[in-house]
Image: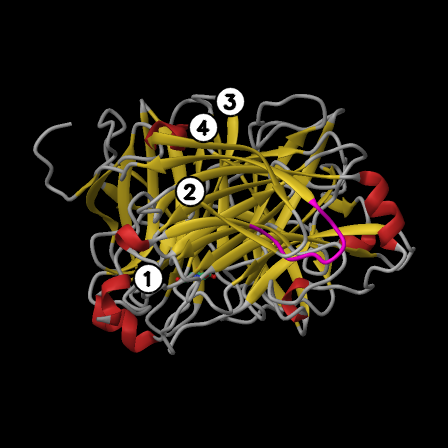
């Protein structure tokens, strides 16, 4: 039975059933992490959008709570859409979200917890002044959504938010200033705009420290700080970010590198990953990123299985001090509490064309850390003959052999490799003649099932001299989240094996390069399932 493999994930957050999309208003309050999310109470496809709500002590184990907000007002009757939380210095919590009105206009609305002394923040009140913002002149009635977390204005007595939109094909970020979150003033110009990028959904805007490992409060600015601007492009359904500088007086953000501007440069994730949002975790002084990961099977199958979509394992986000040109994403340390039995394979030599099974069975829930040593001299010499212009998505996948790649791991495979998902590096020649390392995930042979996407994902990964190549992969039944070089390049895959499931799921090392030997060392942990309890729960 093919549907056997469509089992739910074991340690990724998802509702008990039905459809989920964007993470909303994540926050830490009084000992609990709160996650809200776009939810359809009635079906496994998008619609009737309501705010689901769950709480956790550690971002891994969750308690489902009653809906935080349902579409019950004229201004959000067509959907309580995406929004963000702001915790004010006096401890109040502000929730701003987009309402889709009875006549299908996108407006911004204000809500807050009914009772701040309830640590679970069960009940939410919509402000009687709603909607607090309607589309300004010149902005399409359906192009005005997803308010960000607020940050303090330079004089410190007002708050600013940004909201995504577009003018013709130019993606833009409008900025509003407010004292009370009820009355707003639209600031002149845009925080930023990029021609050709279309509608910007779910903008995120936050500071990162150039020198410290910790995350920063959303209002932080000054020397030693850069700002990340992220937009979710409605046109191609990917999350693009860029590093830059925020001038709060001019209210302008400028990218460090115009060639790597928002929407044309770097992505958070080169697989399935969208509508993400960060929050500052004041509990552990870190910035945490949540992202929505949709299914890549047919909609009929989602309806049959009764559920669709998961949230990523939350990731910490920091500036990459080594490269200076990207952020680093890494699964929150709490996920390591799920690690149980471990297996180590050290100094495995992988000659050209080798496939080495690793003695781990029931390999559907794993945390894998693998490193690969290649000899620099070999790479330098061979690069001259290596192929130029390699690109994971058009490469034909891991079966295609080059001089210096592919090599890496194979997950969610069965014994005979009739199903397999390779996660790998491929070294090619860049346009300047120097070696460029690519990081890919190949779904082409991931499933015998017909009605599922089978794509090769990936992109370049920056590498410093003398660095080993490294992969971290979180495998959870139908999802594989993979991080190269400590999180410089990330790929999330949804795969639906029909044979490589349960006890039959295996993991391999491979080297399909023709002109390169690599030495691999791998540590693998089996992962326990997360405890995600329905409401009402017996005990806390
Ligand atoms: N999802 C929400 C919108 C947002 C989109 C609606 C992004 O607010 O723009 O469910 O996935």
Q: Marks 2 and 4, how far apart in space?
A: 10 Å
Q: Marks 2 and 3, how far apart in space?
A: 18 Å
Q: Marks 4 and 3, how far apart in space?
A: 13 Å
The residue tagged with tag 2: helix, strand or loop? loop
Please name the residue shown 74% across and 44% down the image: 462
Q: Position of residue 529 (x, y in %)?
A: 27, 40
Q: Nearer the viewer, residue 32 or 405?
A: 405
Q: Is residue 351 magenta?
A: no
Are circles 1 and 2 on residues that touch, CB within 8 Å?
no
Please name the residue shown 51% across and 69% down the image: 444
Magenta span of residues: 510-517
Q: Which residue is mark 2?
A: 313
Q: Nearer the viewer, residue 389 or 356?
A: 356
Kindly indicate the quadrant of the structure image that contains residue 451: bottom left
Q: Which residue is mark 1?
A: 76
Give whichever of discs 4 and 3 has the lower sequence position.
3
| Rendered view: 488 above or below 293 | above
Q: Nearer the viewer, residue 506 or 532?
A: 506
Give whichever of discs 4 and 1 has the lower sequence position.
1
Q: Is residue 513 magenta?
A: yes
Q: Position of residue 130 (x, y in %)?
A: 36, 53
Q: Which residue is mark 4?
A: 333
In the picture as drawn, the residue positioned furthest to the left comes out as 538
Give whichever of discs 1 and 3 has the lower sequence position.
1
Closer to the camera: disc 4 or disc 3? 4
Quarter containing ligand 1? bottom left
Q: Specify the label residue 285 is tagged with.
A: 3
Residue 217 showing in the rendered view: yes
Give whichever of discs 2 and 4 has the lower sequence position.
2
Kindly indicate the quadrant of the structure image that contains residue 420: bottom left
Indicate the quadrant containing the N terminus: top left, top right, bottom left or bottom right.
Answer: bottom left
Closer to the camera: disc 1 or disc 3? 3
């Amino acid at each position: 039975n093919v549907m056997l493999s469509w089992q739910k994930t074991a340690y990724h957050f998802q509702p008990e059933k039905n459809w989920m999309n964007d993470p909303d208003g994540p926050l830490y309050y009084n000992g609990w992490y709160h996650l809200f999310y776009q939810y359809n109470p009635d079906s496994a496809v998008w619609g009737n959008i309501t705010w689901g709500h769950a709480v956790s002590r550690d971002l891994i184990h969750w308690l489902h709570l009653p809906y935080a907000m349902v579409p019950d007002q004229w201004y959000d009757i067509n959907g309580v859409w995406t929004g963000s939380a702001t915790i004010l210095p006096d401890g109040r919590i502000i929730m701003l979200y987009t309402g889709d009105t009875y006549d299908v206009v996108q407006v911004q609305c204000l809500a807050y917890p009914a009772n701040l002394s309830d640590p679970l923040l069960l009940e939410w009140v919509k402000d009687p002044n709603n909607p607090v913002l309607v589309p300004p002149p010149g902005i399409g009635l359906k192009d005005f959504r997803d308010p960000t977390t607020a940050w303090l204005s330079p004089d410190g007595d007002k708050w600013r938010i940004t909201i995504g939109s577009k003018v013709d094909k130019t993606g833009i970020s409008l900025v509003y200033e407010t004292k009370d979150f009820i009355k707003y003033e639209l600031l002149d110009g845009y925080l930023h705009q990029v021609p050709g990028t279309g509608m910007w959904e779910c903008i995120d805007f936050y500071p990162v420290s150039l020198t410290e490992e910790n995350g920063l409060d959303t209002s932080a600015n000054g020397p030693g700080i850069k700002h990340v601007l992220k937009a979710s492009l409605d046109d191609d359904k990917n999350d693009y970010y860029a590093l830059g500088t925020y001038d709060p007086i001019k209210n302008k953000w400028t990218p460090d590198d115009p060639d790597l501007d928002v929407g044309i440069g770097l992505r958070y994730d080169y697989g399935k990953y969208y509508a993400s949002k960060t929050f500052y975790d004041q509990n552990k002084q870190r910035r945490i990123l949540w992202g929505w990961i949709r299914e890549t099977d047919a909609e009929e199958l989602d309806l049959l299985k009764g559920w669709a979509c998961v949230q990523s394992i939350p990731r910490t986000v920091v500036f990459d001090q080594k490269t200076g040109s990207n952020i680093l994403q890494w699964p929150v340390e709490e996920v390591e509490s799920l690690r149980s039995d471990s297996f180590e394979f050290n100094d495995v030599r992988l000659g050209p064309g080798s496939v080495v099974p690793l003695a781990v069975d029931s390999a559907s829930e794993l945390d894998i850390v693998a490193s690969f040593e290649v000899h620099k001299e070999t790479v330098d010499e061979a690069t001259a003959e290596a192929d130029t212009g390699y690109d994971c998505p058009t490469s034909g996948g891991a079966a295609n052999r080059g001089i210096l790649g592919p090599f890496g791991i194979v997950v969610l495979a069965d014994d005979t490799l009739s199903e397999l998902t390779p996660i790998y590096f491929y070294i090619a020649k860049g346009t300047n003649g120097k070696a460029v390392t690519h990081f890919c995930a190949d779904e082409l042979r991931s499933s015998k099932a017909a009605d599922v996407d089978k794509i090769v994902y990936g992109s370049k990964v920056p590498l410093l001299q003398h660095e080993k190549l490294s992969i971290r992969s979180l495998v959870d039944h139908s999802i594989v989240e993979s991080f190269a070089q400590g999180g410089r390049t990330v790929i999330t895959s949804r795969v639906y094996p029909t044979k490589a499931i349960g006890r039959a799921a295996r993991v391999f090392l491979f080297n399909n390069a023709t002109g390169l030997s690599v030495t691999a060392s791998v540590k693998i942990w089996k992962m326990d399932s997360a405890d995600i309890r329905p409401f009402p729960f017996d005990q806390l």
